[in-house]
Image: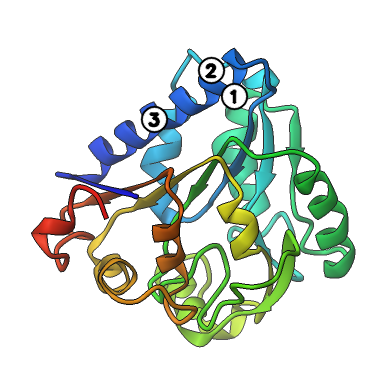
């Protein structure tokens, strides 16, 4: 795993987008229709802005999978991750092959149907973030490191739900759903390449716990250290608590 640190979020996003575009083009050059996983949330804004501006990608060939979604939330809600992906990625570049998680449908059916499509062939590159509680997708601590199911229904802990309020997606904690559909830890790790985009000082404690502590379900994103093709993109605020010697290869 590689940790890279940038002065600010814009340069972080541009560097992550450059590597993402390279991975997508490599898959196409190998004769594959590139398959990608996209994360959502405020941490992904600069990255997705840079990625969607890259004209070297043939988005018509790309197949997109959704990382997670709240159970019971309408696509019209400002916090809907389906809405996020439609507005910030799918509709901007014209991705036709996408598998969104319908939070208003039966969660078990969504996990089964989208999971079957996801598991049918390897994913070329996954874009992920890290939560303030160290979560990976919506796998809050203690995360399930064992399940082989592509998608699972999870209960969100209070720290995760408070983060969503803090980012402005909901007015207060009572509005934040208590359950979500999440891609599983082991499914994320099956991607050929993983790009982890983690800006902002509010992520510094989680970054330190995940990359200096033990690999543990209590710090779910620490599992990324076991994947040889993971690159983590940090800015100076999110990397502020890390030991300097970690900021090359971990």
- Mark 2 Cα within 10 Å, few/some/many (few <14, many 20+)? some
Mark 1 touches mark 2? (CB < 8 Å): yes
Give the CA distance from mark 2 to mark 3: 12 Å
- Mark 1 Cα within 10 Å, few/some/many (few <14, many 20+)? some
**68 w.r.t. 122: above or below:** below
Q: Residue furthest left?
A: 244
* Most foreground residue, 27 or 11: 27
* Most foreground residue, 206 or 217: 217
Report x, y in % for residue 88. Answer: 54, 39
* Residue 73 in view in this figure: no
Disc with the residue nearer the chain's start (1 vs 3): 3
* Residue 211 in view in this figure: yes
**21 w.r.t. 31: above or below:** below
Give the CA distance from mark 1 to mark 2: 9 Å
**214 w.r.t. 8: above or below:** below
**SS under mark 3:** helix
- Mark 3 Cα within 10 Å, few/some/many (few <14, many 20+)? some
> What is the number of the mark on residue 19?
3
Seen at 40% across and 67% down, the residue is: 222
Tell whether 39 sits left or right of 167: right
**SS under mark 2:** loop
From the viewer's perspective, is the residue at label 1 or at label 3 nearer?
3
Tell whether 18 sits left or right of 6: right
Tell whether 36 sits left or right of 234: right
Disc with the residue nearer the chain's start (2 vs 3): 3
> What is the number of the mark on residue 57?
2
**SS under mark 1:** helix
Q: Quadrant of residue 96?
A: top right
Residue beneath label 1, please? 93
């Amino acid at each position: 795993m590689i940790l890279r640190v940038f002065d600010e979020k814009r340069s972080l996003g541009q560097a992550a987008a450059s590597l993402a575009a390279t991975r997508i083009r490599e898959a196409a050059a190998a004769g594959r229709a590139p398959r990608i996983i996209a994360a959502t949330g405020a941490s992904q804004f600069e990255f997705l802005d840079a990625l969607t501006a890259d004209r070297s990608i043939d988005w018509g060939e790309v197949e997109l999978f959704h990382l997670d979604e709240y159970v019971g939330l309408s696509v019209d809600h400002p916090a809907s991750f389906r809405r996020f992906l439609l507005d910030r990625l799918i509709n901007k570049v014209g991705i036709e092959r996408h598998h969104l998680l319908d939070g208003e449908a039966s969660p078990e059916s969504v996990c089964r149907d989208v999971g079957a499509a996801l598991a049918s062939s390897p994913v070329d590159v996954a874009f992920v973030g890290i939560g303030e509680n160290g979560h990976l997708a919506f796998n809050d601590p203690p995360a399930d490191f064992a399940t082989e199911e592509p998608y699972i229904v999870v209960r969100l802990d209070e720290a995760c739900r408070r983060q969503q309020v803090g980012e402005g997606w909901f007015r207060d904690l009572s509005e934040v759903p208590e359950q979500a559909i999440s891609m599983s830890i082991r499914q994320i790790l099956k991607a050929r390449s993983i790009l982890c985009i983690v800006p902002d000082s509010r992520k510094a404690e989680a970054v330190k716990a995940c990359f200096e502590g033990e690999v543990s379900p209590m710090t779910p994103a620490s599992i990324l250290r076991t994947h040889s093709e993971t690159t983590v993109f940090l800015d100076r605020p999110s990397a502020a608590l890390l030991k300097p010697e970690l900021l090359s290869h971990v």
